[in-house]
Image (cartoon, helix red, strand yellow):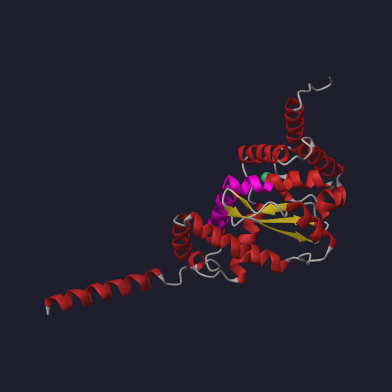
Amino acid sequence: MIKILIIALVIYLLVVTRARIRLPHPGLQATVDVLKAADLSDDEVQRMAAQYVRYCDAQNRVAPAGDPYAERLARLTGRYVAVNGIPLNFKVYKTSAVNAFATADGSIRVFSGLMDRLGDDELMAIVGHEMGHVRNHDTIGAMRKAYLASAARNALGAVGGALGALSASQLGSIAEQYASAQFSQGQETLADDFSFGFLIRNGYDPYAMASALEKITQISRQGGSEADEVMQLFSTHPDSAWRAARMRSKADLHLGRRSGA
Ligand SMILES: [Zn+2]
């Protein structure tokens, strides 16, 4: 009898505690979500990233099979099926923006505006850079941060999202945070270095990353609407001119040349 009473008391306390946590106090719920987000495993973050990229795909004009942009990207990337055990998938967004991004589940999205401006090897240099962010797990860190920021900011929007299906508004909020998330200069440098090795291993032009970054620098320096189309990815990256120079001297060194010689 006493046992039953104790069990009943425990159940009662559990129910009351849960009820208290669920009180519609926005700040409290946000705190609960932030705590949950801090606990997310890499697998959970990758699943969240997969939901996020499905949302992005639905929000953008994805080039369908047979589209010249889709065919070009498929021809160039077909042999790259995984990086560091993470399966890759590639799609083109048809928009004039000069951009590309990767997510933790191994999705890489390339904007047709970027494809218009780069040759094949240059494009693969940027793809290699994005693969570097996936391989180095930068994308896991960025997604976790985006979720934390979104949960902290949108008390109502983030309820219980991490472990279940995220709603469109939660994904929209995460998208905002992810788009403005910046990788550190160290992460960018390592992703550039990964791209350089990727170019060399696969027989591309060792100068492709340098020239891609030079073109992007040129567009952003022109100003005006063209520059606006160089999305955050490049404009907030550490100085792209500095990165281009670094990649050029790496290629010089690789080919045993000295600048100016
Ligand atoms: Zn980057």
Farthest residue toward the bottom? 1
The answer to whether one can see residue 27 in this image is: yes
Residue 118: image x %, image y %? Answer: 83, 47
Rendered position, 43 above or below 184: below
Asked if the magenta segment contains residue 23, the reply would be: no
Q: Nearest the camera: 38 or 40?
A: 40
Most foreground residue, 194 or 34: 194
Extent of the magenta region: 130-149
Q: With respect to residue 256, does 97 lie above or below?
A: below
Residue located at (73% from left, 35% from top) = 243
Picture layout, residue 28 above or below residue 125:
below
Which of these two is toward me, 4 or 159?
Answer: 4
The quarter in which the N terminus is drawn is: bottom left
Ligand 1 picture quarter: top right
Q: Is residue 17 left or right of residue 179?
A: left
Magenta-colored segment: predominant secondary structure: helix
Side (left or right) of 37 relative to 254: left
Task: Give the number of callouts.
Answer: 0
Quarter holding the C terminus is: top right
Q: Is residue 95 visible?
A: no
Q: Is residue 185 above or below residue 224?
A: above
In the picture, residue 203 is in which quadrant?
top right
